[in-house]
Image (tube, helix red, strand yellow):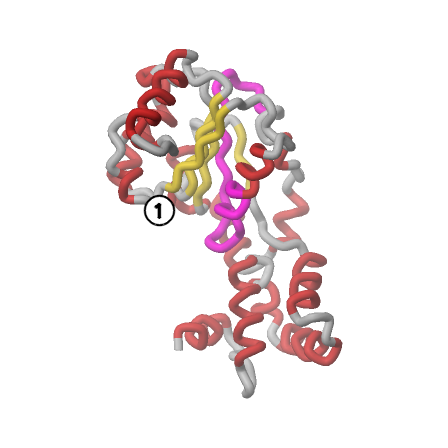
Amino acid sequence: FPDEELVALKHRGKVKEIREKKIPVELKDVFTSCKEARKVVLVEGVAGAGKSSMVINACREWGMGNIFKEFKRVVLVELRDPNIQAAKTLADILPARNREMAEEMEALIRAVGGEATLIIFDGWDEFPAHLRQVSLVQRIIENPGSLSLHKSAVMITSRPECSADLHHLASSRIEILGFSEDAVKEYFTESLGGNREKVEKLSSYFEEHPHIADSSYVPLNAAIILHLFLSFSQALPSTLHGVFCALVL
């Protein structure tokens, strides 16, 4: 499928069609499968699909020694953070107790050209448009040599409609599709405590409103639907628009 068609299918909840065209990949293998010398992995997914949860889990798993063993340092950078958006030096984005430690870390990383260092930029779609053109983050991604980071690896998360300017830089593009059909059923069943009556009632609701059922592959949407199901004493909304309006009200 062309990219624009995939985006349309995601928004319509047509995950089955997408999965048939995609090759599954394990988180632990996303960098080992890259052939380029500079590894730039672009992770795309619609809002609420679980991109941020994935990178947080990746950092946790790396810290436990379960994945990404080729990296000695993993830095998670949240691009929605105003301090990150104003960063001028590598030290500005490094997690450290104080400035002196941050600068020591920067010197160490740059001394080895960023070797064995993974920088994860979470939320490219939340990064201001003008900073995508000129900023420290942009230089790390597009011109790492200017910062002595040419041996570093990068992972970037973004909604697909905002990531076109990164496609030519990516050595690998990965799609987070959210829940599988079985995972959706498991999520609702477990969240409802296995209550058969409630599970059957929710299943009937989905059968009557398949367009809402199709949207629940996105974890955030599933959580919203579950919240409304548990909160509403009357009938649930019959449209997605109604679902989101009910949440706000």
Please state the extent of the stretch shown in magenta in the rendering.
34-56
Residue 61 x/y as whole percent: 60, 37
Q: Residue at x 34, y 46 (%)?
A: 80
Q: Position of 42 compared to 145: left or right?
A: right
Judging depth in this view, the residue of 42 and 2 nearest the camera is: 42
Q: Based on the displayed image, in which of its 4 quarters is residue 140 positioned?
A: top left
Determine the residue positioned at 43% across, 28% down.
Answer: 168
Q: Nearer the viewer, residue 110 or 48?
A: 110
How many other residues sit within 10 Å of disc 1, few (<14), some (14-19) or many (≥20)? Answer: some
- In the rendered image, the residue lying farthest to the right is 196
In the drawing, does residue 144 fall left or right of residue 18? left
Q: Percent x, y for residue 58? A: 56, 38
Q: Is residue 26 magenta?
A: no
Q: Residue at x 31, y 23 (%)?
A: 103
Image quadrant in which the C terminus is located: bottom left
**Tag 1: residue type?**
Glu
**Residue under the image location 27 percent in, 44 percent down:** 82
Q: Which residue is mark 1?
A: 126
Q: Is residue 106 above or below residue 165?
A: above
Secondary structure state at the residue bearing disc 1 = helix
Which residue ends up furthest to the top in the rendered image? 111
Up-down relation of residue 186 to residue 177 (above or below): below
Whether residue 54 appears in magenta in the rendering, the answer is yes
Q: Which percent across, then down, holds residue 126?
A: 35, 46
